């Protein structure tokens, strides 16, 4: 059975949460005997379509004429779909380009959609985009929401009849506690984007004295964050991209992981799960998304109001206490292993794909 995942980018080289999720899901499905592959758009405008194998996964990149607000425009996705030989498409939303490409492709192949997030950055276009998106989602065999909280708070998901909750999982073998004591630093991992709340974190850090802060991931705002840290007199350790092995060690050594996001664009926060599976407590924000559902306040970490440097600083101080940290560390590890193990997620996804694609076995 051939399952073609449709999104704008793929890991590697793009290191975002959705891209990494698609990579890991394809890897798991292929290990189960399913032909999972990806259909994405070229990052370089106007360049010819190309096919490659990345970590054993076939990836087809189709042409696009560029991107507007991160969304590919005038793409070759419709032709790529027609040429893919898919038994089942798995779309990853938000990607308006794929919605309209599907209409142009005029296929009757079944499809499912993982609804990672509402359209936030391009929300002003929703009066134009929404009717087509709703029709597209209604035609899916299933629309997969990443959390019950997102179903409740999304004006799109709450109107659909075919929504199922299937949260992403984390590899609890790869992401696992280390043997050494925490090194005492506080950690952020993710792309440096406006909605991540890094300005709020740096403002909170002004009152932390000599506490150590590590920001890893890089991205569009990296230079700005370096300048802001210097302006505030904060000696933050700011890193660009880190390797997979470095990432695990960073989580293991942290006193706590901080996800200070301020906007609905942070729909789930897969990095929270990675930290929790390493036994590292999480400080996150009370967004109307899946973020505070993943990190349960008082169980796996501390949840604070978004865009509140004072509340964030108070939570950081609480996790400097060894007993508080130990209690939340145990809860984080237990919650990750019980509710978010990637093996359970993969088994559910495999069964869903076989049903949706009309196959009784692989």
Image: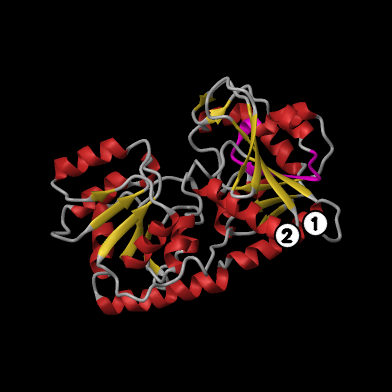
Residue at x 36% of width, y 78% of height: 327
Residue closer to the observer: 165 or 229: 229
Q: Secondary structure at mark 1?
A: helix
Residue closer to the observer: 57 or 221: 57
Please name the colour scheme applied to the rendered image: secondary structure
Residue at x 59% of width, y 59% of height: 167
Quadrant of the rendered image containing residue 210: bottom left
Q: Which residues are magenta?
A: 85-97
Residue at x 66% of width, y 33% of height: 98
Observer able to see residue 255 = yes
Q: Is residue 86 magenta?
A: yes
Disc 1 to disc 2: CB gap under 8 Å: yes
Picture layout, residue 299 above or below residue 15: below
Residue closer to the observer: 156 or 233: 233
Q: Which mark is residue 354?
A: 1
Position of 127 with respect to 137 (left or right) is left
Picture layout, residue 321 above or below residue 186: below
Residue closer to the observer: 237 or 298: 237
Position of 198 with respect to 210 (left or right) is right
Q: Which residue is mark 2?
A: 350
User: Could you give the CA–CA distance between mark 1 and mark 2, rounded to whole angstroms?
Assistant: 6 Å
Residue 308 x %, y %: 29, 52
Question: In which quadrant is the C terminus drawn?
Answer: bottom right
Observer able to see residue 303 = no
Residue 165 x %, y %: 64, 58
Q: Is residue 358 magenta?
A: no
């Amino acid at each position: 059975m051939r399952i073609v995942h449709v999104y704008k980018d793929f890991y590697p080289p793009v290191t975002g949460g959705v891209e990494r999720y698609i990579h890991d899901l394809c890897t798991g499905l292929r290990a189960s005997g399913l032909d999972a592959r990806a259909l994405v758009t070229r990052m370089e405008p106007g360049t010819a379509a190309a096919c490659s194998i990345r970590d054993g996964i076939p990836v087809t990149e189709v042409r696009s004429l560029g991107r507007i607000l991160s969304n590919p425009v005038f793409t070759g996705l419709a032709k790529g779909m027609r040429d893919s030989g898919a038994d089942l498409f798995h779309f990853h939303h938000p990607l308006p380009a794929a919605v309209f490409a599907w209409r142009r492709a005029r296929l009757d192949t079944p499809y499912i959609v993982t609804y990672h997030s509402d359209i936030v950055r391009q929300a002003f276009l929703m009066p134009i985009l929404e009717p087509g998106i709703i029709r597209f989602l209604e035609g899916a065999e299933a629309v997969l929401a990443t959390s019950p909280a997102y179903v409740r708070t999304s004006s799109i998901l709450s109107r659909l009849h075919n929504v199922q909750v299937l949260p992403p999982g984390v590899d609890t073998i790869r992401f696992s506690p280390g043997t050494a004591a925490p090194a005492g630093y506080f950690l952020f991992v993710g792309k440096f984007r406006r909605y991540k709340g890094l300005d709020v974190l740096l403002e909170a850090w002004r009152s932390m004295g000599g506490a150590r802060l590590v920001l890893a991931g890089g991205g569009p705002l990296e230079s700005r964050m370096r300048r802001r840290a210097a302006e505030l007199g904060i000696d933050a350790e700011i890193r660009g991209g880190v390797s997979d092995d470095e990432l695990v060690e960073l989580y293991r050594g942290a006193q706590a992981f901080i996800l200070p996001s301020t906007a609905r664009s942070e729909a789930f926060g897969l990095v929270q799960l990675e930290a929790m599976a390493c036994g590292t407590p999480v400080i996150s924000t009370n967004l109307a998304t899946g973020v505070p559902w993943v990190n349960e306040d008082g169980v796996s970490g501390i949840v604070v109001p978004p865009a509140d440097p004072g509340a964030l600083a108070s939570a950081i101080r609480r996790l400097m206490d060894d007993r508080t940290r130990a209690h939340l560390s145990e809860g984080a590890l237990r919650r990750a292993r019980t509710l978010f193990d990637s093996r359970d997620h993969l088994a559910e996804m495999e069964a869903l794909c076989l049903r949706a694609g009309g196959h009784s076995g692989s």
